[in-house]
Amino acid sequence: MSNKTVFYCSEYETTSSDGLWLGDNPLQFATPLLLLQITIISATSYLISLCLKPLGQSIIVAQILGGFMFGPSILGQIRIVEYQLFPPRGRLILETLSTFSMMFVFFLVGVKSDVIMMIKPNKRAMTIGFSVFFFTISIPTIIAIVVIKTMHLDSTLAVALPLTTISQAITSVPVIAILLMELKIINTELGRLALSSTLFCDILGVTVVSIIFSTSGNKDAGIVNIVSSISASAGLIAFAACVYRPVVLWMASQTAPGNPVRSGHIFFIMLSVLASGLLSEVIGQHYIFGPMIFGLAVPDGPPLGSAIVSKLDTWITHFLYPIFLGCSGLKTNILSIRLEAFVIITLLLAFQCVVKTAAVVFPALYFNMSHREAIALGIVMNAKGVSELAVYNMWKEVELLGEQEFTLLVISVMVTTTLVPPLVRLFYDPEEIYMAMERNTLQNSKRDSELRVMVCIQSQENVPTIINLLEVSNPTPQQPVVVIAMQLVELVGRSLPILMAHGEQPTRALEPNLSKSNHITNALKHYEAHHQDCARIKFFTTVSHFETMHDDIVQVAAERRVTIVIVPFHKQWAIDGSVGSVHRHIQNVNTNVLSKAPCSVGILVDRGILNGSLTIINTPADYHRRCEKKRETDRLGRASLAALGEGDAGHNEARRWDKSYTTSESVSTWA
């Protein structure tokens, strides 16, 4: 590989101009030039995304193409674009901003990751993750070495082939999570398995890339310097785990439930991101290494992880992240690609995709997945995105990749991102899961059978009316009620959705009164205690995006053979009778549950707040006082259960609930 040094001469200039009226050309100054570059790339990317959206393509393709348009491949051939809009001095500032953006992008990747699942994966995920990593590196790397030994390749291509095979073994959690969200299958069994397998594979990939970078940064030094660099990297990881993490855990403990995180704590964490990037450069690692490790040390979810994500996510995702993708596009030059390199790298990448898919399919079949689901999982694991682009940029900076190899790899990311979504849809249709579920409705249930009710709770304000509904259902030893209570929590501050089944505990073992979740649990436990031998409660919590939350509701309803699912109405009333708030995300969840649930569905319309009172049940005394006031509450407030169905089915289900399970006039049903 040639060590070519290029010098750019530029006269000293201030950062801002005095304006056209005083004879200055704004494009000769750093600030207006940077603003124009960002505006042009962002606007072009947005227009391309509008064109690609009807084709179901990811926005990452549009953002890379936004920079690609102004690179040397297309418009960069025009003199005014090359020397006025994107001159070498301007690109330096733009790439510096891109560097800054990647530090925070990978810090957020670390914050959203679940470290426990990384180091303690289940057997199936660990098997698939190890298979993917081992076979995707070993077999194609052997082929690459054989090609290098048997063919006369130039030095840059010979160095790039093994790196190409290693880079394809990288499987990144944020890339897979974004793909699954776009396909709306992140809450399915396939989606959860893909994420858990990727977590384990990600650890191996980061380790290998870090070792390669330490070695390449000291390629002219001795073995002592290489070992020192790797040891320093291990020391930084130990510092993050043993010093930094206890500090941020203490910060999290200082935040009371429901209160915002102190601004001083957020400032300390942001400052630590910059410091970790500096430390990474000092010890010979890449600047994104430290921020990602420090991000992993921050506990995901509320209160700290959620607060950091809410403050940074929009700014980074919609502003800084596209700048990095645009810069990657600017560096590509299809005119530098030679036919020999194109054929060899294309065939090697295609072969590696086949190996990676097979490395997923065979273990998945061993664990009794269907053939179509196993193939779909293998295709998902081939997805590429920001992590791979970061590695390619890293290797290009240290001259491990030449211009043509970098261009081919960036194009491979765009091609893979374009092909993966339609191929996954071809082999995997989540709607088939719902069609195969056995239906279990109120209309078809036996009169004296056990009533299995699933109640979905968005907030503690839903609990009093839900308990009122369960009370008037009149549970008896001959006709008991099984309540599956699922709390709906929006996914904020982490990448992986969670469906958690709480362990069964003694009826009177109450949770400490520290959070809204505990209030909900305690209230339902009191109901169970008040109806011993007549009612049983099982608790679930789903932490998910509202767009895919219905998958968890439907899955649990099918597994527990629920007779009716009761979901909260999306409107809440104020004390004066007007509509106080409208939750459109809950409306979308309800619509999806109505269309896909394998049982009856009721929407609980709660007008109980019109009586001016709201009961929080934390102790047995609270529960008994509520029972004493029940008749008065029935006169003041009213709840309606909308049992919905098509045609006469909805009316029949409503009549069946009224006739078999309702013993109070405070609850009405309608279809």
Image (tube, rainbow, N blue to C red):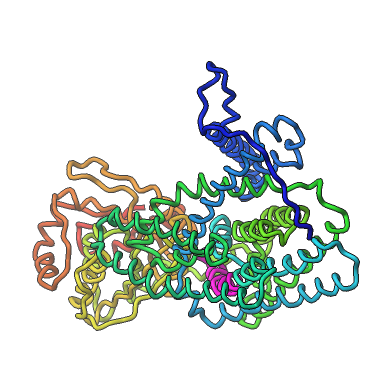
Where does residue 281 sit, x and y in percent of width and height? 54, 61
Where does residue 188 sit, x and y in percent of width and height? 53, 67
Where does residue 82 sit, x and y in percent of width and height? 71, 35
**Residue in the foreground of this view, choosing between 310 and 431:** 310
Q: Quadrant of residue 408?
A: bottom right
Determine the residue positioned at 39% across, 53% down.
Answer: 310
Determine the residue positioned at 26% across, 53% down.
Answer: 606
Question: In the rendered picture of this protein, how many numbered marks are placed on residues?
Answer: 0
Horizontally, residue 540 falls left or right of residue 69, namely left
Q: Quadrant of residue 130?
A: bottom right
Q: Main secondary structure of the magenta part?
A: helix
**Residue in the foreground of this view, choosing between 415 and 527:** 415
Residue 396, relative to residue 335: is it above or below? Answer: below
Horizontally, residue 431 falls left or right of residue 569, namely right
Determine the residue positioned at 53% across, 58% down.
Answer: 181
Query: Can residue 219 be seen in the rendering of this structure?
Result: yes
Horizontally, residue 545 falls left or right of residue 178, namely left
* Segment colored magenta: 185-207
Residue 193 is covered by the magenta coloring:
yes
Query: Can residue 491 be seen in the rendering of this structure?
Result: no
Where does residue 557 sit, x and y in percent of width and height? 43, 69
Residue 620 is covered by the magenta coloring:
no
Quadrant for the N terminus, please.
bottom right
**Residue in the foreground of this view, choosing between 78 and 373:** 78
Horizontally, residue 8 falls left or right of residue 653, namely right
